Image (cartoon, grey):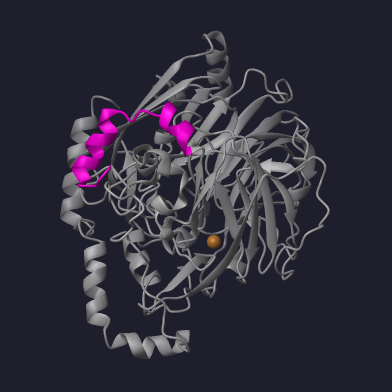
């Protein structure tokens, strides 16, 4: 119902509509996922992943306390998929979290899958594919949870949702093959072609003089952090990643991939001019900046349609608000003690296939044969033994109720935005650039900033804390999608014995596994007899022989490149790109099938 209503009602009107309803409504979305064509930057038509034949994707809208049901039909034809609801805690419904190989099997082409969960947290979220680095092909959209008890209720007149995104012209299938390759031994990430606001460019946001707007901003991009500013207006930050903050004024923000900010902006009192707002991709992330790359996307606050839309001014310095200093509105104090401390050292290096990978403590993530949740559910008392999850999942078993600390030492010269599924976390230490590994006795704020995605600086460190109060299998990973692909993930196995008592897997989830021939019992190797025997578990390529450098790799491995290409073909079996004719046929089929719905 919300899907069709949202076409006609402004968010505020929807809010009022929901406010009249009983608290625990059920909102249902039917997502028929398929390829469609789009040209959001006006420079290149390409296939993107649409829903019900449309792209950009619909916004999922719910009221705090609602049950959300998303019925997914995979009509892509050539790729499997899944949906993650970024930032939603999924407390008691870990099986609905979405990452394949972790809490579910892939949804194969032709298969369907139902996500069914309640949302008991307000704020600004998003949903995206969590399969095979697929979401930058367009499978991402906003998820907004309204709150009848918001501390900022009455402080604004209307609201606006803005998504920001880097954009590529090639598909992820093509880009990933080039990225994780012997021909790219330094691991240079593909550089975006352009930048989008609400999946387009030059967007006009109509505003009324003197009114205050809640502007919800979501970076749904694959890679680039975005500097954001509104000329002639101050932003008042009131929410980050679903956590209300004490209001904090900012002239500029830096929003990493996957982060969200809600800000209040009060409009000026006259209607004599319109004002540009700008997102600027953080070019520090790019190994090379092409001459023709426009790192900016511009929109306008339109006070008066008859006035000009003047170009944005040039900016010399980028000096964004430091989110470390935000204070959660609920005043939650720093945890007084830590029960379980985990240290993760982040590095990037080559493996024996010559490609570049990312590592935590010298281990790069490789998905297990059996999704980790299913291993936790099928290994009895051994579910508390990290061995059963396989070495390459980087699994850490957490005890229920423990205060867990993750110390992240970034031994890489890049910036990395880290996301923890199932939780927000206190950000208690974040070093400046080049400060090296964490040392003890660093002062911590008495009321630390909380969010679900935070950036660690180049060759710096980060310390976060959270309470293990949500039994489940929760990924901790960099949200630069290239680094997900190169293995920068760890797995938090939280209270697995409790999980065994509270989770029951719906039949349609098991069916998805059968459709993809994925085993659902036993350890990471699919061994059900001796679950401590991990022989046959998926592993990464072997390390390079000692003394090899990235430069030497190219010469060495090109001699076996044909073998490598053979392997790549196997890895992508069933994922070959559709021909133009196939795409057109798919598009027409969906047009016909969804004509009645739309
Ligand atoms: Cu990263």
Residue closer to the observer: 464 or 538: 538
Q: Is residue 305 visible in the rendered structure shown here?
A: no
Q: Is residue 569 visible in the rendered structure shown here?
A: yes
Residue 312 picture location, percent across and down: 66, 55
Which residue does the image show at 83% across and 53% down from the upper left?
443
Which residue does the image show at 75% across and 52% down from the upper left?
322
Residue closer to the observer: 12 or 129: 129
Quadrant occupied by the N terminus: top left
Residue closer to the observer: 498 or 85: 498
Q: How many marks?
A: 0
Magenta-drawn stretch contains 508: yes
Which residue does the image show at 26% across and 29% down from the upper left?
507
Q: Which of the 4 quarters of the picture holds residue 161? A: top right
- Say if 28 sits above or below 336 in the image: above
Ligand 1 lies in quarter = bottom right
Please state if 456 lies on the left or on the right of 509 as rendered: right
Residue 7 picture location, percent across and down: 43, 26
The chief SS type of the magenta part is helix
Q: Which of the 4 quarters of the picture holds residue 409? A: bottom right
Quadrant occupied by the C terminus: top left
Residue 370 picture location, percent across and down: 31, 48
Magenta-drawn stretch contains 137: no
Q: Residues in magenta?
A: 496-520
Residue closer to the observer: 29 or 529: 529
Residue 3 picture location, percent across and down: 40, 25
Please state if 97 lies on the left or on the right of 254 as rendered: left
């Amino acid at each position: 119902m919300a899907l069709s209503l949202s076409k006609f009602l402004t968010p505020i009107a929807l809010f009022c509509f929901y406010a009249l309803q009983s608290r625990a409504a059920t909102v249902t979305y039917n997502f028929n996922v398929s390829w469609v064509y789009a040209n959001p930057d006006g420079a290149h038509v390409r296939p993107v992943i649409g829903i019900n034949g449309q792209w950009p994707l619909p916004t999922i809208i719910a009221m705090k306390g609602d049950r959300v049901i998303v019925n997914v039909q995979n009509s892509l034809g050539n790729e499997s998929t899944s949906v993650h609801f970024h930032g939603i805690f999924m407390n008691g419904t870990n099986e609905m979290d979405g990452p394949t190989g972790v809490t579910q099997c892939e949804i194969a082409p032709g298969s369907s899958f139902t996500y069914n969960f309640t949302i008991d947290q307000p704020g600004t979220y998003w949903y995206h594919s969590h399969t095979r680095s697929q979401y930058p092909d367009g499978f991402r959209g906003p998820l907004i949870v309204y709150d009848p008890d918001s501390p900022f209720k009455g402080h604004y007149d209307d609201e606006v949702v803005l998504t920001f995104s880097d954009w590529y012209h090639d598909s992820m299938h093509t880009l990933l093959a080039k990225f994780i390759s012997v021909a790219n031994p330094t691991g240079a990430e593909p550089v975006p072609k352009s930048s989008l606001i609400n999946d387009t460019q030059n967007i006009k946001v109509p505003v009324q003089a003197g009114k205050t707007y809640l502007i919800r901003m979501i970076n749904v991009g694959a890679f680039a952090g975005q500097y954001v500013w509104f000329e002639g207006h101050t932003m008042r930050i009131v929410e980050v990643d679903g956590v209300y903050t004490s209001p904090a004024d900012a002239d500029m923000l830096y929003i990493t991939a996957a982060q969200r900010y809600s800000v209040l902006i009060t409009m000026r009192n006259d209607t004599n001019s319109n004002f540009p707002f700008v997102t600027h991709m953080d070019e520090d992330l790019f190994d090379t900046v092409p001459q023709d790359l426009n790192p900016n996307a511009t929109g306008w606050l339109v006070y008066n349609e008859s006035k000009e839309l003047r170009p944005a001014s040039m900016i010399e310095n980028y000096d964004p608000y430091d989110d470390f200093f935000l204070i959660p509105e609920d005043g939650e104090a720093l945890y007084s003690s830590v029960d379980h401390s985990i240290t993760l050292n982040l590095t990037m290096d080559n493996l024996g296939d010559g490609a570049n990978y990312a590592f935590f403590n010298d281990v790069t993530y490789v998905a297990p044969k059996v999704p980790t949740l299913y291993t936790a559910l099928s290994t009895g008392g051994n579910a508390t033994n990290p061995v059963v999850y396989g070495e390459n999942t980087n699994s850490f078993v957490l005890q229920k109720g423990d205060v867990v600390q993750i110390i992240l030492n970034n031994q890489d010269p890049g910036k990395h935005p880290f996301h923890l599924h199932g939780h927000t976390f206190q950000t208690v230490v974040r070093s400046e650039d080049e400060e090296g590994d964490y040392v003890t006795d660093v002062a911590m704020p008495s009321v630390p900033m909380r969010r679900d995605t935070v950036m660690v600086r180049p060759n710096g460190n980060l310390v976060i804390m959270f309470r293990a109060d949500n039994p489940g299998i929760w990924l901790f990973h960099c949200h630069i999608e290239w680094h997900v692909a190169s293995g920068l993930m760890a797995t938090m196995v939280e209270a697995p014995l409790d999980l065994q008592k509270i989770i029951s897997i719906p039949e349609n989830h098991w069916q998805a596994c059968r459709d993809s021939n994925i085993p659902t019992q036993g350890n990471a190797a699919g061994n059900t007899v001796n679950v401590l025997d991990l022989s046959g578990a998926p592993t990464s390529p072997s390390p390079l022989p000692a003394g090899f450098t990235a430069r030497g790799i190219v010469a060495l491995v090109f001699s076996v490149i044909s073998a490598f290409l053979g392997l790549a073909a196997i890895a992508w079996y069933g994922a070959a790109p559709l021909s133009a004719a196939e795409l057109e046929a798919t598009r027409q089929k969906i047009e016909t099938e969804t004509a009645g719905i739309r």
